[in-house]
Image (cartoon, grey):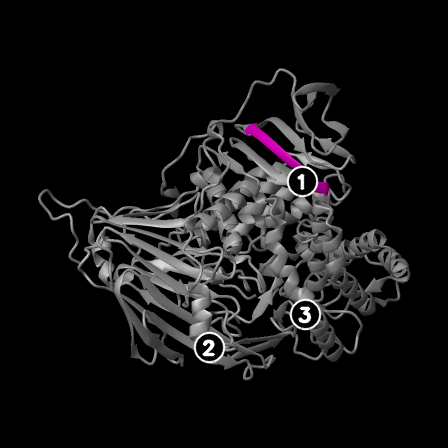
Amino acid sequence: MMIMRGYIAGWAIVFLLPQSARSEPSLGGSIATRASISIEQPNVLPTQAVGLGNGKLGAAFWSAQGLTIQLNRADTLPERRSPGQVSFPDLGILIKDRHFRGRLNLEDGVLEETGDGVSLRAWVDHDADRVIIDLRGLTPQKVQHIRLALWEPRKPVASAEGDIGVLAETWLDNMPPGASGRKFGSLAAVRAIGRAVHAVVIDERTVEVTALPSAAGRLQVVIAAPGFRGDQSATQAANAVFAPEVNLEATVAWWHDFWARVNPVRAESRDGIARYAESLRTIFLFASAAQSGDGIPGSNAGIAGLFSSSKDDHFWDPAAFWFWNLRAQVAANLAAGVPELNAPVFALYRNNLEAIRLWTSGHMAGRPGICVPETMRFNGNGVEFETDRFRPFAIITHSCDADWSASSNARTLTTGAEIGIWIWRTYLQTNDREFLRANYPLMVEAARFLLSYQKSGPDGLLHTAPSNAHETQMDVTDPTTDLSAIRGLYPAVIGASEVLGTEAELVQRLRTALDKTPQLPVVAATAVASPALSASPDDKVIAASYEPAAKYSNGENIGLEPVWPYELVGIDDPLFAIAKRTFELRPFKHMATWSNDPIQAARLGLGSEMAQAIFALAQLYQVYPNGLSALLTDPPHEFYIEQAAVVSLALSEALAQQEPSGLIRIAPAIPPGWTVSGVTSLRANVSIAVEAVDGQVSAFSIRGGNDSSLSFVTPWKGRVQIQEDGRPLRMIEGEHFTISAQPGKVYHVSPVGSTLAPSFRGETAATVKTLGRATIGLGPPCCEPPPGYSRRLDN
């Protein structure tokens, strides 16, 4: 994905989070309570929307006209069209009160607002694709108007029957390049629960429901937006969603259960970076849960698409998926102990396996296996087609196409390999053999393709050329991405084949190919394209390819791919020092919302650099106080989730890492001065809980395991005590030890005589958080009125 650098001044978005069900007052409250976000003035702009979702249906809420809601689904393809916007113009009374306040009940996943005696609660039902608005304190005799509308050039069928207003539309995906020929559609319907409810058609794109509140001033509005392709009447589809009784408790229970499963991380530092990073992590987990349902992933290009407030406007092709922009989300979910949130991502590629195979055969010179397109359309082909009202012309590119021009991802070969590696890592963490069996074909077919692409050279080694170093170098020889993917995928396929007892002949071919795969390209730092000003001829770095001077076409630090995501360079590797120098001399610092700088700094044990990268990226891109970010300064103004995912994963990597050898490093990158208490998930269902005070690790604990032997390296040099379920187990000397972790046991490890323990500020109310010019939360109006001025705002 091409990038542009920018900052959008003056924008404010509030994204509110559910509260964790965990209750640990000594640690300053649950992570979701600590990440609560305050709306201290009406969020009247679409770019100030808050988001909720149930995995399939998402909604953005802002205070225009009192209240406006945009409905979003991921299955309204190929353009991801919104089912519509719903407005409540008679709720102006709510937002004109200068003492208006809003927040999301973080434990329950409910948006709450109050003003001038009116209270509002809103949530997205987790049992049905509908949004519920519960209003109280209304004037019983004042009619409330609820208007559902679409916009040009949409052509819905508008209908009204009794107390229900409906907009429904279907279309064929038969026009863009790579079209699937499938039928898609959208449906939105509004129904009120009150008195004298009546629905009417206003015009071809608008319906309206009017209602009187109850005698007690209460009105409930239910907005249905199920998946719809015209297989049944719009009224029937809407009534099926309206039928269940409104039940907030089921949604509350879902969010409670989710937060109870999430690995908590709490962090504070005097410079504020730690606390801010903790909030970004919690925001990511909320957004990830809200967009990870059945079927297609909610994020396609690093965007939190289910929370859009920009009508049908999208910059990147909404039918295409960039795995580069999904991988940090996949990794962060794994580290947080909620791998189930990745199910839609793996399903997308698994369900398109045959289509990807056909694309590969037809566009990659008949080669076997699968070359997964980096910009894969939802139906498995490699077409990326971008056209919108903000562009003067359409853009068409192909991924995995031997005959396409040398550009972008035409010959990016590694997407399938990386997906296969994440499948293997998920299995190693969960021990879910059925998951591995279901997704193994993706791994093995990606390996078959790379084997067919490797060709023997005069040196007797197997090379890949022409091939892209992702989007950074075009058509070069042996890109570092290819070499890393081969060294990561082939052992993974070998391991998976042995677990499943299959593909013995392929396993032998992979072993042979591994022995003949070139080493990573290590060159003088001055030999690469655009060398850093501080580089000297004596500095060695990992280059982007074996053509280090080939020009760069995008801002990716390809030389650091072996560090992460491929995790090939461990602390004992001879390349570790070179990898650290590669990071220091990287050509693109803090570039784009997807920048991996914080993760790669953590993997290299550079805690201070990790913190500095989190700060710098927040200043550049986290311009919405919902914790989401903006990649582009130009419209449409979309909310990106990928930066929060990067921060989330970086915090987990700072707590504990597993080397390629299996060695577990404790607290390899906790920055100086940080007080932290957090948990991260590793292989074999092992979770590691780490505590540190002012940057000094005070203790850690081990939970899970399968009787396997676990080796650790700790930050301590002296005597260390190990307890099993609170009972002394043994003493050790030095930083290294090995333990056989038994299922159901908890092992606590700390230096002898240590009395340090982290403590955090307890927070039960929503707060606005700031870091430099970045903000999470929407603060109060800038000025208090002079004495005697009305509490109400007339404008």
Q: Is residue 45 magenta?
A: no
Q: Secondary structure at mark 3?
A: loop
Gap between marks 2 and 3 measured at Cα: 29 Å
Kindly check if marks 2 and 3 are in contact, taking CB atoms under 8 A apart as contact.
no
Q: Residue furthest bottom?
A: 175
Q: Which residues are magenta?
A: 684-692
Task: Say which mark, if any, is on residue 164.
Answer: none
**Residue located at (76% from left, 51% from top):** 433
Q: Which residue is mark 2?
A: 233
Kindly check if marks 1 and 2 are in contact, taking CB atoms under 8 A apart as contact.
no
- Residue 659 in the image: state x and y as whole percent: 73, 41
Q: Residue furthest left?
A: 788
Task: Say which mark, if any, is on residue 352.
Answer: 3
Which residue is at the front of the view, 320 or 210?
Answer: 210
N-terminal of the two: label 1 or label 2? 2
Q: Residue furthest top?
A: 753
The three-letter code of the residue at mark 1 reads Gln
Side (left or right) of 502 relative to 87: right
Q: Secondary structure at mark 2?
A: loop
Side (left or right) of 191 relative to 473: left
Q: Nearer the viewer, mark 2 or mark 3?
A: 2
**Residue located at (44% from left, 75% from top):** 234
Gap between marks 1 and 2 measured at Cα: 53 Å
Q: Which residue is mark 1?
A: 657
Q: Residues within 10 Å of mark 1 (few under 14, many from 20)?
A: many
Name the quarter where the N terminus is drawn: bottom right
Q: Residues within 10 Å of mark 2 (few under 14, many from 20)?
A: few
- Residue 400 in the image: state x and y as whole percent: 69, 72
Q: Residues within 10 Å of mark 3 (few under 14, many from 20)?
A: some
The three-letter code of the residue at mark 3 reads Asn
N-terminal of the two: label 2 or label 3? 2
